[in-house]
Amino acid sequence: MLLRSFALAGYIAMSSLASVPQWSRDIKSFRSSLKLSQAALGRRLNCSAMAVSRWERGEQPPSAAFYLAIAKIAGPFFGWTFWNLAGINEDDLPRMPGRKARTKKKQQNLSNAITILEIEVARSAERAVRRDALFPDLPTLELRREYKTIAAAEANFSRVVACHIQLLKRLGV
């Protein structure tokens, strides 16, 4: 009798799994692959955990806006599953608006910002040379250690800014 009830329970579980729509299984699979709870996915999508639960049980499909939000989190590979569910297919891509080009004013502002950053990097190097000349005059070993720490931090910051400037230039700014 006990074996029969387990078999019956297994049959009910399998039949209920078969009745869950594919979109529901896709959502659950996606959430599981991210190792997120229903509440965590709900927070990322700006909806309740209960809504995610209803989707996963197949009780109520998400709106197209939620499919698109899930696709955005999923990225290009798994995202197509959800874009298709939202009604978007590859034929729609050419009709979608592209990234807006920068206006001349924005381009000029960015160019000015790069110029200012370059000037500050150069000034930082000049300040470092002047400070290094004062280093031997520091009275205590503790002050010298502190100076070296500050000088290293400023040099690292200056290198990071210089790298970002180069990256912006390579991107065609």
Image (cartoon, rainbow, N blue to C red):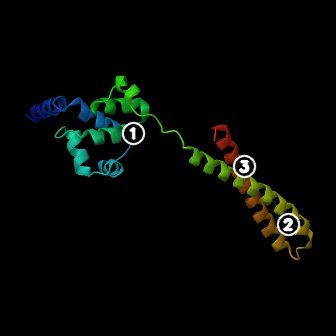
Left of 35 or right of it: where is 9?
left
Q: Residues within 10 Å of mark 3 (few under 14, many from 20)?
A: some
User: Disc 3 versus disc 2: distance between alpha carbons?
Assistant: 20 Å
Location of residue 99 with respect to 127 vertically, above or below: above
First-in-chain label (3 vs 1): 1
CA gap, disc 2 to disc 1?
A: 50 Å
The amino acid at mark 2 is Arg
User: Residue 6, how many percent across, how many down?
Assistant: 14, 34
**Which residue type does callout 3 highlight?**
Ala
In the current view of this chain or complex, which residue is farthest to the top?
Answer: 91
Number of on-image labels: 3
Q: Are marks 2 and 1 in contact (CB under 8 Å)?
A: no
x, y percentage for residue 85?
27, 31
Please tell me whether mark 3 sits on a helix, a strand or a loop: helix
Mark 3 or 1: in front is 3
Residue drawn at the location 20% of the way across and 44% of the way down: 54
User: Which of the labelled discs sits on residue 131, or is there none?
Assistant: 2
Please state which of the two labelled residues, at mark 3 or mark 2, is closer to the viewer.
3
Residue 70, placed above or below residue 46: above
Please name the residue shown 84% across and 60% down the image: 126
Mark sitting on residue 72: 1
Q: Residue furthest left?
A: 1
Residue that mark 3 sits on: 162
Q: Sequence order check: which comes first, mark 3 or mark 2?
A: 2
**Residue 68: image location, x then y, percent:** 33, 38
Element class at badge 2:
helix
